[in-house]
């Protein structure tokens, strides 16, 4: 047991606070029965600050705290491109996609596909998303969260997985999105405060008492880890099996700025149910867009919390500053230093009290994401599968019940599969790569669906159906191709096919379900424009400084 009594009090207090708050906000007024809008869209009553906080709490999970810190250990600051480009992506989504979603009054992303295309496209993508959320997202977050419990508290992996799943289930399954979103507001505070505390202590250790000097020493000791744009052969990193691989395979140079990174970012922030669901639950379009701006500013801050600690851990290991630290970084079975053990090991350096706060922050990130993913899984299954094929006449109460059962089943499946991820070195990269099997198709059908009126349903179905097969074929035929570049190639192939099919089938005419984007649909407030300008300016400056 590596947590002192005070740490345990802080941590247990946090757990009680979140569960209590989740159950409290889930209460309904006397005589009111929770309906589908209450459960899946938080009664469409979220203000901008709750939207932004919930977006970040849902996004920042074990895959960032542990997975991205592990990638910081292996790759360096270059992995921050996922965070900094996400800030710009949020602006794009807020301007060009949110107005369309909110105007349509949809509950789910597959629901938008039904409105724009047909049932076949909606059902195909619903199945893909359900598989992705359960077998990749939920599973990987459970595994990484359990890894932290195993490293810090020496809790066996299996019990850690079960414990985290139960924690997230207690309030999220009962309360739905309302419980998830409002507890996220509290969880973001713990996430940022605890994360900054860990960064400060790590830099202080490297800088012999001075965090500022520690930051300077990082650039001096591992200058290659502060390059944002990697060249082929520039950096060799661990592959998790005792050998090395070219970091270019994970972050292929300029492709992170002009290639596949845009596909993965827009697919995640613009067409991903457990992200967009927060914006759809906002009071209004203006509140949703303000929430996106708030989330964008927080994304700019995240590398300081999740990447810099990983780089600091590398310096500590390289310089042999702490023998116990180095031993904790090693896999207990293989004895190989594992990148993903960097953040849990760093937590052990924190003083009493702060360790409990940081551990609470990590748990906040894990639990909030688990709750969000499970809620979105239940939303898609209930609204796009169950209601369409099994319960056309299901009452509001029945839909809520099905949603709760679906979330519970998703947790059980993910908990069974999670231990199998133990062989990975960088789970963050695993998530990005396998999410990337579906992202090109998702991006293609949404992009053309919104901006090209001639896109037909059959063209969209081809784009949806071929995304995974094309990605798999390219992976095996061209294994040395970076997965971000592979996503770009698959998107271009799908885009070409969709254009040809649409032109041949539609004979040059607009699709009857095409979207009218004329007028002031993309109009934004002055405050939004100012925030967007500041975010763009800061992001550009960061890339110039660390090029």
Image: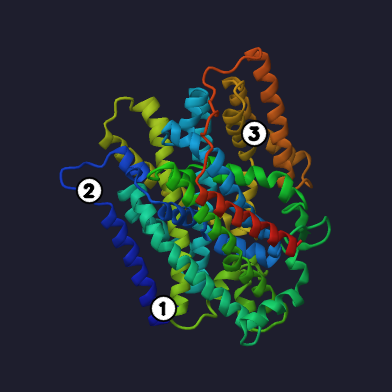
Question: On the rendered image, what quadrant is the N terminus found in?
Answer: bottom left
Q: Secondary structure at mark 3?
A: helix
- Mark 1 and mark 3 in contact? Answer it, CB < 8 Å: no
- Mark 2 and mark 3 in contact? Answer it, CB < 8 Å: no
Residue picked out by circle 3: 467
In the displayed structure, 268 sits above or below 212; it is above
489 sits left or right of 394 in the view: right
Q: Residues within 10 Å of mark 1 (few under 14, many from 20)?
A: many
Q: Position of residue 148 (x, y in %)?
A: 51, 67
Q: Secondary structure at mark 1?
A: helix
Question: Farthest residue toward the front?
Answer: 526
Query: In the image shown, does 21 or 315 lie closer to the viewer?
Result: 21
Residue picked out by circle 1: 7
Q: Residue at x 64, y 34 (%)?
A: 467
472 sits left or right of 280 in the view: right
Q: Residue at x 40, y 54 (%)?
A: 50
Please identify, in this view, whether the residue under mark 2 or under mark 1 is nearer the observer: 2
Residue picked out by circle 2: 28
Nearest to N terminus: mark 1 or mark 3: 1
Q: Position of residue 17 (x, y in %)?
A: 32, 66
In the displayed structure, 264 sits above or below 294; it is above
């Amino acid at each position: 047991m590596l947590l002192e009594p005070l740490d345990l009090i802080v941590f247990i207090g946090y757990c009680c606070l979140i569960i209590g708050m989740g159950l409290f906000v889930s209460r309904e007024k006397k005589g009111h029965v929770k309906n589908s809008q209450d459960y899946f869209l938080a009664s469409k009553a979220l203000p901008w600050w709750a939207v932004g906080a919930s977006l970040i709490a849902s996004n920042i999970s074990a895959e960032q705290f542990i997975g991205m810190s592990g990638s910081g250990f292996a790759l360096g600051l270059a992995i921050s491109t996922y965070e900094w480009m996400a800030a710009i992506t949020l602006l794009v989504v807020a301007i060009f996609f949110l107005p369309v979603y909110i105007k349509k009054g949809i509950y789910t992303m597959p629901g938008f596909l039904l409105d724009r295309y047909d049932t076949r496209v909606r059902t195909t993508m619903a199945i893909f998303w359900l598989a992705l959320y359960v077998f990749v997202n939920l599973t990987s977050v459970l595994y990484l969260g359990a890894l932290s419990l195993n490293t810090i508290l020496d809790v066996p992996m299996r019990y850690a997985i079960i414990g985290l799943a139960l924690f997230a289930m207690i309030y999220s399954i009962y309360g739905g999105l309302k419980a998830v979103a409002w507890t996220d507001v509290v969880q973001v505070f713990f996430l940022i405060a605890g994360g900054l505390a860990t960064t400060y202590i790590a830099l202080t250790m490297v800088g012999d008492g001075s965090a500022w000097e520690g930051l300077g020493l990082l650039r001096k000791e591992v200058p290659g880890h502060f390059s944002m744009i990697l060249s082929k052969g520039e950096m060799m990193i661990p592959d998790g099996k005792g050998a090395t691989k070219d970091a270019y395979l994970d972050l292929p140079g300029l492709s992170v700025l002009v290639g596949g990174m845009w596909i993965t970012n827009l697919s995640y922030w613009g067409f991903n149910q457990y992200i967009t669901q927060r914006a759809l639950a906002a009071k209004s379009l203006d509140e949703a867009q303000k929430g996106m701006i708030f989330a964008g500013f927080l994304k700019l801050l995240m590398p300081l919390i999740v990447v810099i600690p990983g780089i600091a851990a590398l310096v500590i290991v390289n310089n042999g500053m702490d023998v116990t630290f180095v031993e904790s970084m090693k896999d207990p079975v293989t004895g190989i230093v594992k990148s993903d053990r960097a953040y849990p090991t760093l937590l052990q350096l924190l003083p009493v009290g702060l360790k409990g706060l940081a551990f609470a922050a990590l748990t906040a990130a894990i639990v909030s994401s688990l709750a969000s993913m499970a809620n979105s899984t239940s939303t898609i299954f209930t609204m796009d599968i169950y209601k369409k094929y099994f319960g056309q006449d299901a009452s509001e109460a029945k839909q809520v019940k099905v949603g709760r059962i679906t979330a519970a089943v998703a947790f059980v499946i993910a908990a069974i599969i999670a231990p199998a991820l133990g062989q990975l070195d960088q789970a963050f990269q695993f998530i990005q790569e396998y999410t990337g099997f579906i992202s090109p198709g998702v991006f293609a059908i949404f992009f053309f669906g919104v901006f090209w009126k001639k896109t037909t349903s059959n063209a969209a179905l081809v784009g949806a159906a071929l995304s995974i097969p094309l990605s798999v074929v390219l992976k095996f035929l061209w294994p040395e191709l970076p997965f971000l570049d592979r996503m770009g190639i698959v998107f271009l192939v799908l885009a070409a096919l969709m254009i040809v099919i649409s032109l041949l089938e539609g004979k040059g005419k607009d699709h009857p379900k095409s979207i009218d984007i004329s007028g002031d649909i993309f109009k934004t407030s002055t405050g939004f424009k100012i925030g967007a300008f500041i975010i763009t300016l800061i992001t550009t400056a960061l890339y110039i400084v660390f090029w």
